[in-house]
Amino acid sequence: MSKQIIGVIGGSGLYQMAGLEAVRRVEVKTPFGKPSDQLVRGKIGAAELVFLPRHGVGHRWLPTEVNFRANIFAMKKLGVERIISVSAVGSLSAAIAPGHIVVPDQFIDRTSQRPSTFFGKGLVAHVSMADPFCPDLSRMLADAAAAEGAQVHRGGTYLCMEGPQFSTRAESQMYRTWGAHVIGMTNLQEAKLAREAEICFGTLALATDYDCWNEHAGAVEIEQVLAVLKQNVELAQKTIRRAVASLGQSRTCRCASALKDAIITEKSRIPRKLRADLRPIIGKYL
C-alpha cells in the first residue's frame, strides 16, 4: 500500500501546523522559481503531511505575489495527492457569521494578474473546472469541522479577488447579486493548478468579517479580522488532524485522472525541455 501524503497550505493566521512529529524542513526546486517558503514535512499518525505557509513565514507575500505555480509544483514533486487549503475570507451572506467555517464547492474568478496554469510555451492542455473542489475531500473536511464543534456551511461560492485592498461597498453588493457566499484573495489559482497536477483540493474557509456590504457590521478592519482568525486557528488545526485521520489511502474521485485526454498538443511537438520540466505532472501521459 502506498504512503499517504497530504499537503496543507496555511493562509493568514496559520503559519505553522501543530501536532506534527518527525519535523524537517525542505527546499524544493521548481521550474517556476521558489515556493513561498520552505516546506515542512512531518507525520500526523500514519499519514505524512507537507505544510506550506502561503504568504511565507512572517507573512511577506501579497496575494498577487504568491508563487502559486511553485507552491503546487513543489507539493506534487514531494508526492502530495491531496491538498487542504486554509483561508481567511469575508462573508457575503448574513447566514455566514464571523467565526463560521465554509467548505466551498464553486468559484468566481475576479483576478487578472496571476499565472494560473502550468501549461503554455508549446504545450496546450484543457482540464475541466466545472467542479473545482474535490467532492470527497470537501465532504471529509466538513464532517471533521462539524465533529470539532464548528458552525459549518457545506458548499458555497468563493469569489477570488485580486486585492490587496478590500472591496468597495458597490463591489461587495454586486458580488452578492452574483450568488457569491464568501470572498478571498488566494484559493482560485491553487485549485486550478491542483487540478492540472491531478491533486485533490479542498478548502477550509474561515469567515472573519461580513466584508463591507453589511453596513451594520461596519467596514472591514484588519484588527478585527486578525482577532477572529486567532480564535479560529486552533479549530482549523484540530479539523485538519481529524480529517487526515479519516482519509483513506486510495482515491476514488476524478481528480487523479484530470489530465487524461486533456493534453491537446501532439506529443512529438512538445519541446524537450518542457517535457523534462513538467515530468512530475505529465510524465505518465508521455
Image: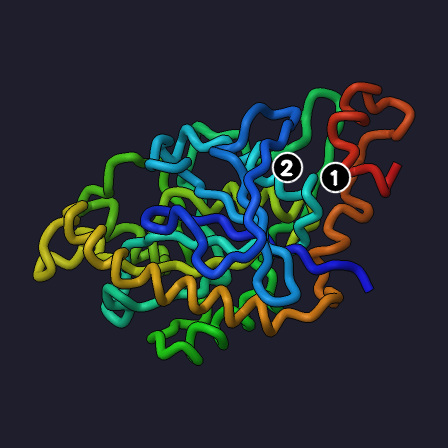
Q: What is the image's colouring? A: rainbow
Q: CA distance from mark 2 to mark 1?
A: 8 Å
Name the residue located 61 percent from the left edge and 34 percent from the top edge. Answer: 117
- Dot 2: few (<14), some (14–19), or many (≥20) neighbours within 10 Å? many
* Position above or below: 48 against 279: below
Name the residue located 46 percent from the left edge and 47 percent from the top edge. Answer: 187
User: Picture coordinates of residue 255 (x, y %)?
Assistant: 69, 56
Q: Is residue 98 left or right of residue 146?
A: left
* Quadrant of the drawing holding the C terminus: top right
Residue named by callout 2 = 73
Name the residue located 45 percent from the left edge and 68 percent from the top edge. Answer: 239
Asked whether disc 2 touches disc 1, contact meaning CB atoms under 8 Å apart, the reply is yes
Residue named by callout 1 = 281
User: Picture coordinates of residue 132 (x, y %)?
Assistant: 57, 55
Q: Secondary structure at mark 2?
A: helix
Name the residue located 32 percent from the left edge and 53 percent from the top edge. Answer: 89
User: Picture coordinates of residue 99 (x, y %)?
Assistant: 27, 66
Q: Is residue 208 left or right of residue 114?
A: left
Q: Is residue 68 visible?
A: yes
- Amino acid on which disc 1 is placed: Ile
Q: Is residue 283 left or right of residue 68?
A: right
* Quadrant of the drawing holding the N terminus: bottom right
Count of number-bearing discs: 2
- Dot 1: few (<14), some (14–19), or many (≥20) neighbours within 10 Å? some
- Write down the quadrant of residue 249 in the picture: bottom right
Q: Secondary structure at mark 1?
A: helix
Marking on residue 89: none
- Amino acid on which disc 2 is placed: Phe
* Position above or below: 40 against 49: above
